[in-house]
Amino acid sequence: MTQELNYGDLVLVCGDIYLGTRSNGIPNKLKNLLQNKVQHLIFTGNSGDKDSIEWLKSIYPTIHQVRGQYDDDDIPENKFITIGTWKFFITHGHQIVPWGDEETLSIYMKEQDADIAIYGNLHEQKVSKLDKKYFLSPGSITGVYGGMNQNIRKPIRCISIQVNQQ
Amino acid sequence: MDDDQEKYLEDARKVVKEQAYFMRASLDKAQLKDALRYSSAMLSELRTSLLTPRNYYMLFMQVFDEMRILEGYFKEEYRRGRKMQDLYESVQHATYVIPRLYLLITVGSVFIQTHEIGAKVILADLIETIKSVQHPLRGLFIRYYFLKMCKDRLPDTGSEYEGEGGNIDDAIEVIIRNLTEMNKLWIRMQGSKEKSRRERERLDLKVTIGENITRLSNLEGVSLETYKSKVLPKIQEIVVSSKDVISQGYIIDCTIQAFPDEYHLNTLEELLRMCTTQLEPNVDIKNIFILLMNRLAAFALNNDMNNYNQEIDIYTMFKANIDKMLDSNNQIEFKNLLDLQVSFLDFTLKCYPNKSEYINSILKSCCRLCQKQNENDFTEECQKNIVKFLTLPLDTMSLSILTMDEYPNLMKYLPFQKKRQVAIKICQAVVNLHQVIHDYQITQELLRFIQPLLITEADYVDIPEQEFEEEQQLVARLVHLVSHQDLEQQNRILQSFIARFLKGDIQRQRYTLPASIFALFKLIHEIHFNNQELFSNQQLTKVTLFNQIKSLIELIQPNHPELALRLYLNFLLAINEVDQAQEFNEFTYDIGSGIISIFQDEIGDSNVKFTTIHTIMATFSKLTCIEAENYDTLASNATSQAAKLLKKHEQATGVLNATHMFYNEHQKIPQRVLECFKKALKIASSSIGQNPKLVYVYICILNKYFYFAQHIEVKEQDILEVVKTIQEKLPLALKDNDDQSKRIKIYWNNTVEYIRIKKKGGLFGFANINV
């Protein structure tokens, strides 16, 4: 019974908040929904005002954050992290030519054996797979203008990972 | 003097302790007569005139505790069959009045419990007898003792003493009489000399008076009706006839605190009339009002005020009385009147959340009040109150407060720092409530009120950098709340903001203009997808909007070239979205060239250069709004910039990534792609001698070959060359086994794995690769 209900660790993946520069605020309902529910937080970049980092920290105190093109220079460009047995490659993606291209992303992933790539920049929610590698884009949590996609939506992504499975 | 007091108190306490000890010993031996004698001696200490009221109180409490024991014994006696009547008589033999009366009260309390005689008879008798103690301090305490002893012996409704022993009226009568007497004595304590000391002493004892009111409020039988018809009028009588400032203020305060808010709502008129017309001039009526309004405001949060408003218009009642105070009484300090107004405003906001005319009316009286003052009267405290005045309504009324005519009138009484505070609170309220800004008039008002944040005027005061940043970011957020179904209106409002922003200096524009630029991008996007005809409107032509955006970015460029560059990149994409016809080909080309110039001249840091050139290349590769020739120029320029990067591996990989500009969903120029590969290989080969770790670049090149091999013709020979070079140089690169080596190793292993899989799948081109 408990085995079935155990979803493993919950990872929140989100990005491109642009607080202040392109959006006025994050909906309050999101905060209530997400607080104390996740064990990891991956943020693809472009926070905007400092308030957005505070908001993220209130969801979970440790953020795996990478630099968006409008972020400060002291944030890392890319990050490789491991959660359970899964290896992640995290990048904002504005500096990867071409944007959102799975093959190009998998070349970067080869450098550190990553299984899953998480990227932003396109403000588009997308999950794809290529040759046993997975690619995830959470889009923009505030649904701001700026991606390549015509539709402005506000998706966030929550992946659930069972720790011992490959 | 104080040392003497300490000594007196110590001595008295010692005696009490001693006599109490003997008293208890006698009780243990059932020697009542002796016990009474010792208790009498103990109680005699309360005859003292040496102690200050506060010290007398302490002594009293000690005696009180000891008397509990005696009381318990009396109860036992009754159970053993002794007649209470006899006891009642025998304690009256005590020599001195004070001990006699304390004992009498104690027995009386037990007597009542026997139900042998009606409660009211005994109570009446006791009250009569204690009348004889007229010394203010001692009289006060004996009546306090009486009150405490009668606590549960009153003929309250539903109590065991009701019926023959009396009813609620009798109970009320007893307490009221006691209160009346105690109050008289309390007032007499004032005397005529040493005013402030006496006042302090009186206040030390105020709880003894207050206990009467608490007792009244605890009576079950005091319903709303009873309170209204019997209790309040009697309290009123006591208050008014006392003509004593401390007394009046304190008793009213107690009454408001002790009884439920519903009772007050139903007797509001009498209460307010009493407060404003029947009290001594120095009584702090304002505090009473504030107390009352705060309680009612809290009450309103949990209860529907409409139930009460039907019969009595509470707001009008308060307003009439408060206005009277504002106009007539010059003695009340300006600051205190403001306190009152703030309380009233808070109360009105909570009880009448929808009545904006009430709010405006209160604002008006506040303005009238301020007008009467001199400049010097506006102290820090007063200013704080005015700020409160202006910001309290924001949470419930948000932007509509700005339409009240009196609002700006109040702002002018504030110095810059406080105006700024109000402006920030306004922005916060709007942002936190996610208020949509869609009214042109209100926007003008809003901009007027937040002016301290927008423009540096003569009275500006510097603030710390972080605060300034937060403030400007708050303003930026406002822009994104501008929204209107009619996009022309939306633009009109947006332009109001931009016009104001242009009047600020570059430190502000650094925050406000990017927000405006993105709002304009969004506007263009919305027109394009929802209502393209609007592009023909004079204010909304693409030319107008594009030129405006360009001029805004140009303002930022001198001080923040990096930011300007990024904005230009976004600009390219914005144009790209709406200009498939390539109408603005030259314009867009200029922007692109501008970007290259900024990159070349203004970006210094090599790491920043590396990521920036990639962002540029990625952006360029998405453009379809530029004619082929112009595109080729831009792309080639970007490629040459990549070739000029600081480090060799950066140059090589930069040029390698340039390939995507020449081959993607829109462009298909295989020749240029191969040129890039050639260049990359040249750079790599020229330097790999000095730096074996550059084999990393070769692995990148190899992977890129695989990428393009599916789309363009790549010579198998070239691929094999690269493989050969890697295999040759790899051992040297991995020799020192540092972090970089480890990465190269993983990279190469994964590439090998990739080749193996592709070979197995029989993919063209991989057949001859042997690793």
Image (cartoon, grey):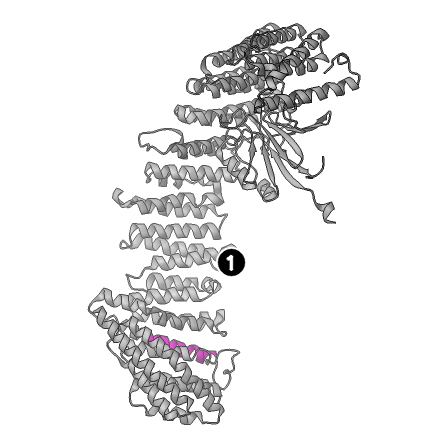
Name the residue nearer the viewer: B361 or B116: B116
Q: Give how far across and how far down residue B463 sits, in percent.
A: 36, 34
Q: Quadrant of the N terminus of chain B?
A: bottom left
Name the residue nearer the viewer: B163 or B258: B258
Magenta stretch holds residue B171: yes
Magenta stretch holds residue A99: no
Q: Give how far across and how far down residue B619 sits, in percent.
A: 58, 17
* Circle 1: element type: loop
Against B723, residue B511 (above or below) is below
Query: How busy is the neighbourhood of tag 1: few (under 14 within 10 Å), some, or many (20 plus)?
Result: few
Secondary structure mostly seen in magenta is helix
Q: Which residues are drawn in magenta?
A: B168-182
Q: Is residue B177 visible?
A: no
Q: Chain of mark 1?
A: B
Q: In percent of the image, x 72 and y 8: which residue is there?
A: B716
Q: Amino acid at mark 1?
A: Gln
Answer with left or right where residue B383 lies relative to residue B443.
left
Residue located beneath label 1 in the image: B310
Name the residue nearer the viewer: B764 or B92: B764
Against B126, residue B386 (above or below) is above
Against B258, residue B477 (above or below) is above
Q: Give how far across and how far down residue B770 sits, in percent.
A: 74, 14
Answer with left or right where residue B657 lies relative to residue B82.
right
Q: Give how far across and how far down residue B605 sits, in percent.
A: 47, 18
Q: Is residue B40 visible?
A: yes
Answer with left or right where residue B244 lies relative to residue B125.
left
